[in-house]
Amino acid sequence: MASRAPVYITRQIPGRGLEMLRREAGVDISPLDRALSPEELAEEVAGRLAVLCMPQDLIDGHIIAAAGDCRIFANFGVDYDNIDVAKATRRGILVANTPGVMTDATADLAWALLLAAGRKLLEGDTLVRSGRWRGPKPSELLGADLFGQTLGIVGAGRVGSAVAMRSRGWEMNVLYVDEHPNHKLEAELGATRVNLDVLLRQSDFVSLHVPLTAKTRGMIGAAQLEVMKESAVLVNTSRGAVIDELALVAALRAGRIAAAGLDSYASEPRLAPGLAELENAVLLPHLGSATIRSRGRMSELAAGAIASALRNEVASNVLNPEAWPQRPQ
């Protein structure tokens, strides 16, 4: 194989990350403005020392084997369910992510979705732009009240906690589901830790903030949607596959819940059949971290982890430092 740059980036990235990497080594960037196929990705990672990949890139055993002597896969995102970390570790390959820098941006977007879906903002925008609006009508596009309502947070980690804290201005009652008590939410908001069934039955707004695992995949399905209030709004800024999308389409179409706001999907960029036709679904193109500051910091974190690996060092955002037991940590 012809000589190639030590670092490969699967999509163009914003911020200073590219500049940081080019100070360390040669860099190749995919010229294709799309996710690579498994065959393309396997070909491109061969012979590299480091790969900066996207959450849409499936880094499975085949890709890891094709990577040969690669030192690190740095994922441009906080979630890393697209990477087989165990197999990478066995091959002595580090895996890094970008934690802690997208919390506020994602929490803000969750509220944008909650407001847009709850108050029918996109339906109103469409009505005005279409020229069909004839002035205010007393019964037109009646949305949900927020003040004093119940907000359910599923997953009270960094982002879930930030979403909950933003509810103070609306004086909302906060319920949350998490494996561990969140003493800050309980002390500052009077939040109550409950099980998922109770949260779904009692919440007016439900916001999902869980990683995608075997336990959370499809955790919101037909049975869970059935117990929610008919007036409830469901928001998802975590991974798309935590919701059974076909069940959600059926629930929205039948009016079993009032609305949903989604920023991620199980098979991006494909949508579940029928989802795009629903007026009571607000659909965003995975914008959770899409601010100048957040994406810039993600770029720097991913690049920093790669730069460290090229210097035979292990960065603090590496998920599996045990992959290099003989290296300084």
Image: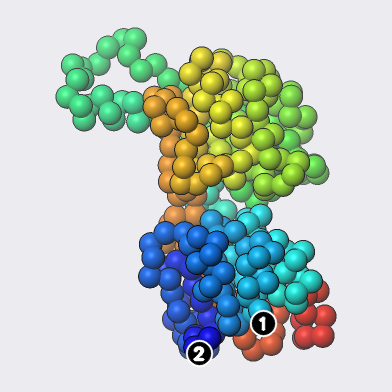
Residue pictured at 48% horizontal, 18% vertical: 253
Residue 163 seen in the figure: no
- Residue 218, compared with residue 231, is above or below; it is below
- Front one among 260 and 215: 215
SS for tag 2?
loop
Quadrant where the C terminus sits is bottom right
Circle 2 packing at 10 Å, graded few (<14), some (14-19), many (20+), is: few
Residue 6 lies in quadrant:
bottom right
Q: Is residue 96 left or right of residue 53?
A: right
Relative image position of residue 283 (x, y in whole percent) = 43, 37
At label 1, the amino acid type is: Asp
- Residue 53, compared with residue 107, is above or below; it is below
Relative image position of residue 59 (x, y in whole percent) = 62, 63
Lower sequence index among marks 2 and 1: 2
Residue pictured at 50% horizontal, 60% vertical: 37
Location of mark 1 (residue): 69
Q: Residue 143 carries which label?
A: none
Could you give the CA–CA distance between mark 2 and mark 1, rounded to whole angstroms? 14 Å
Residue 106 seen in the figure: yes
Circle 1 packing at 10 Å, graded few (<14), some (14-19), many (20+), is: some
Residue pictured at 47% horizontal, 82% vertical: 27
Relative image position of residue 94 (x, y in whole percent) = 70, 74
Location of mark 2 (residue): 3
- Front one among 236 and 292: 236
Residue pictured at 64% horizontal, 89% vertical: 311
